[in-house]
Image (cartoon, rainbow, N blue to C red):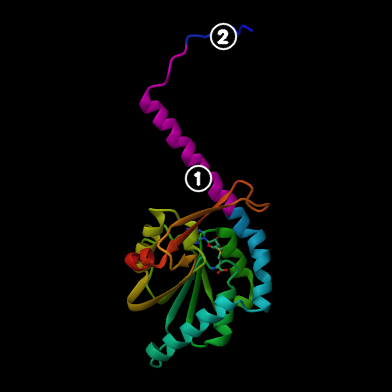
């Protein structure tokens, strides 16, 4: 069998143009992932979180006990300020408000819809909310206690390092940082791509060894 191939005159793009196009495509891919994660975080995930307002999650229970210990140790009759960055529906803040009175509570999330939903929730009255992006916390005030719960696994390097530097910049000297995330004792960095009905395009989950986290702090 003969196959005739007709080759047209093709002009290849200059290497610089290829790189520029690749960069732009990568940027568009990252941005579309971000907005689809934002849609998920502001919609379906907020719905999913509702059950944990009624029934406290085990990880939230552990964090609340840590905060109680800090207040005993450092409170000395004054109100400590606490921020939960990536607060989603504000469940942890809701439980803190009821269980550890006297804290000045603040919540932040990257997505405006989430911040607005928290502001509109009467159960969260007395807690202030603000748009806060862990990748850009320039000029933010400092807090006595900073909590980042189940957010850092979303970041690849170098965003993970940037987030840690930013967290340090909003933590008062001698303050406390509490994080609950996908960290493990084995010396392995793992990337899991979750492909599911919720994330058909794939959501990258970054699992890190404790040692990397210790170095970053
Ligand atoms: C898996 S949820 C965890 C929510 C909550 N902390 C909890 O423990 O249930 C991740 C949260 O991080 C928020 N988030 C994602 N990227 C962020 C960023 N760059 N800065 C601040 N929040 C972010 C999302 O909007 C979402 O509310």
Q: To which quarter of the image does residue 44 belong?
A: bottom right
Asked whether residue 127 is in view, the answer is yes
| Of the pair 93 and 216, the residue shown nearer to us | 216
Residue farthest toward the front in the current orientation of the protein: 1
Residue farthest toward the bottom in the current orientation of the protein: 77
Q: Which residues are magenta?
A: 10-37
CA distance separating discs 1 and 2: 38 Å
Ligand 1 is within 8 Å of the C-beta of the residue at disc 2: no
Report the mark closest to the observer, 1 or 2.
2
Disc 1 secondary structure class: helix
| Of the pair 157 and 46, the residue shown nearer to us | 157
Residue farthest toward the left in the current orientation of the protein: 173
Asked whether residue 139 is in view, the answer is no
Residue 105 at x, y percent in the picture? 49, 78
**Residue 20 falls inside the magenta stretch:** yes
Residue 189 at x, y percent in the picture? 43, 57
Label count reads 2
Labelled pair 1, 2 in contact (Cβ < 8 Å): no
Residue 60 at x, y percent in the picture? 56, 77
Name which of mark 1 and mark 2 comes first in the sequence.
2
- Residue located beneath label 2 in the image: 5
Magenta segment main secondary structure: helix
Q: Which quarter of the rendering shows the N terminus?
A: top right
Report the residue at 55% width, 44% height from top. Answer: 32
- Residue located beneath label 1 in the image: 30
Ligand 1 is within 8 Å of the C-beta of the residue at disc 1: no
Disc 2 secondary structure class: loop
Q: Report crowding for label 1: few under 14, some 14 to 19, many 20 or more residues within 10 A (C-alpha).
A: few
Residue 88 at x, y percent in the picture? 57, 66
């Amino acid at each position: 069998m003969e196959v005739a191939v007709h080759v047209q005159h093709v002009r290849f793009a200059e290497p610089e143009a290829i790189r520029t196009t690749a960069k732009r495509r990568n940027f568009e891919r990252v941005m579309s992932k971000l907005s689809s994660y934002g849609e998920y975080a502001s919609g379906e995930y907020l719905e999913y979180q509702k059950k944990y307002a009624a029934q406290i999650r085990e990880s939230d229970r552990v964090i609340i006990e840590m905060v109680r210990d800090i207040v005993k140790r450092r409170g000395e009759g004054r109100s400590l300020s606490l921020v939960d960055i990536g607060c989603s529906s504000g469940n942890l803040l809701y439980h803190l408000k009821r269980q550890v009175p006297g804290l000045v509570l603040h919540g932040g999330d990257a997505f405006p819809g989430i911040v607005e939903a928290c502001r509109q929730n009467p159960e969260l009255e007395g807690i202030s909310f603000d748009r806060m992006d862990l990748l850009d916390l320039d000029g933010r005030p400092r807090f006595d206690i900073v909590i980042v719960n189940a957010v850092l696994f979303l970041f690849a390097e170098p965003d993970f390092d940037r987030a840690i530097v930013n967290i340090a910049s909003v933590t008062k000297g001698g303050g406390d940082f509490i994080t609950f995330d996908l960290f493990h004792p084995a010396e392995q960095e793992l990337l899991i791509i979750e492909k599911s009905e919720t994330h058909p395009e794939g959501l990258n989950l970054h699992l890190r060894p404790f040692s990397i986290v210790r170095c970053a702090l």
